[in-house]
Image (cartoon, helix red, strand yellow):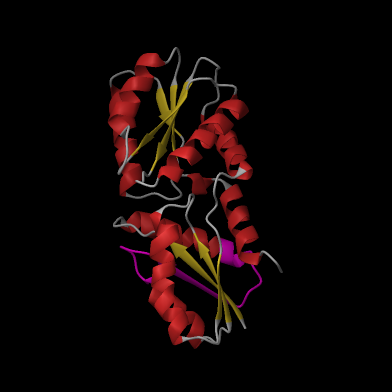
Amino acid sequence: MKAILYIGHGTRSKEGAEEAKSFIHRVMDRINVEIQEICFLELTKPGIEEGFLHCVDKGATEITVVPLFLLAAGHIKEDIPQALSSLCKRFPTINVNIRDPFGVHGKILDGIAELVRKTVVDLSAHDSILIVGRGSSDKSIHTAFTAITKGISDRLGIKNVAVCFLAATEPRLKEGLETISKDTAGKVIVIPYLLFSGLLLKEVDQMVKKRQTLGQQIIHTGQLSKHRVIEDIIIERATEGE
């Protein structure tokens, strides 16, 4: 019997955890697979082992693992395979397939462009965009954000598009905001490249609101899971090959 195991990152934010679970339940409702379970890599329960065992207890003989991660960094390359390795050894007769993260996906970039247009009704070529990534020491993340920056710039016709990060690498959010605010001839649109709400998104929100109270024209789009395209991509990943 087939099963799908969704793995989220996890968060200390109760609001963020509930949002992620609600989002995954919406995805589940759109997929005709009887066994579907939610789990998280860290900080939020249930953990990966518990989610996996729930699938086994319900009779799963084949488990498709769908990581809810935008880009492939240490969590995808090391943490998730490591967490699943011992479980695969305990249950050698169960066929486990781990799907790839979303990657630099054209549909996501299209969705972001649409989200920006809906959020900023008077969007202008003179505006500037700051994309805010979670951050990672993995060099491939910088390569990915170079492609993301170009994709957003091309779709929205805005030349001044920059990237900053919330952790692990430079430039950080504060520096990114200061630099782009000096360089812009119009508004600053901040795009958090994050799937769900949580402490990281609150950090972005607080900095944006602080600048708004000082009179700056600055807006942020909110988390990417607001757009249905993310649901669609997860469903493609989960049902691939069927």
Identify the residue shown where x is 63% and y is 74%. 33
Residue 46 belongs to magenta span: yes
Is 197 placed left or right of 144 in the picture?
left
Q: Residue furthest front?
A: 139
Residue 89 falls left or right of residue 201: right
- Foreground pick, 36 / 84: 84
Image quarter hosting the N terminus = bottom right
**Total marks drawn?**
0
Residue 133, image x, y percentages: 40, 40
Q: Which residues are magenta?
A: 27-47
Q: Residue at x 49, y 18 (%)?
A: 127
Could you tell me residue 199's position as x and y percent? 30, 48
Farthest residue in the right direction?
242
Q: Nearer the viewer, residue 26 or 161?
A: 161
Residue 224 in the image: above or below residue 150: below
Q: Residue furthest top?
A: 185
Q: Quadrant of residue 212?
A: top left
> Could you tell me which quadrant the C terminus lies in?
bottom right
Residue 50 visible in image: no
Residue 182: give x, y in percent of width and height.
35, 15
Q: Quadrant of residue 206?
A: top left
Decide whether residue 202 is among the magenta residues. Answer: no
Picture layout, residue 95 above or below residue 10:
below
Residue at the image position 46 percent from the left and 65 percent from the top: 7
Residue 34 x/y as whole percent: 61, 78
- Residue 219 showing in the rendered view: yes
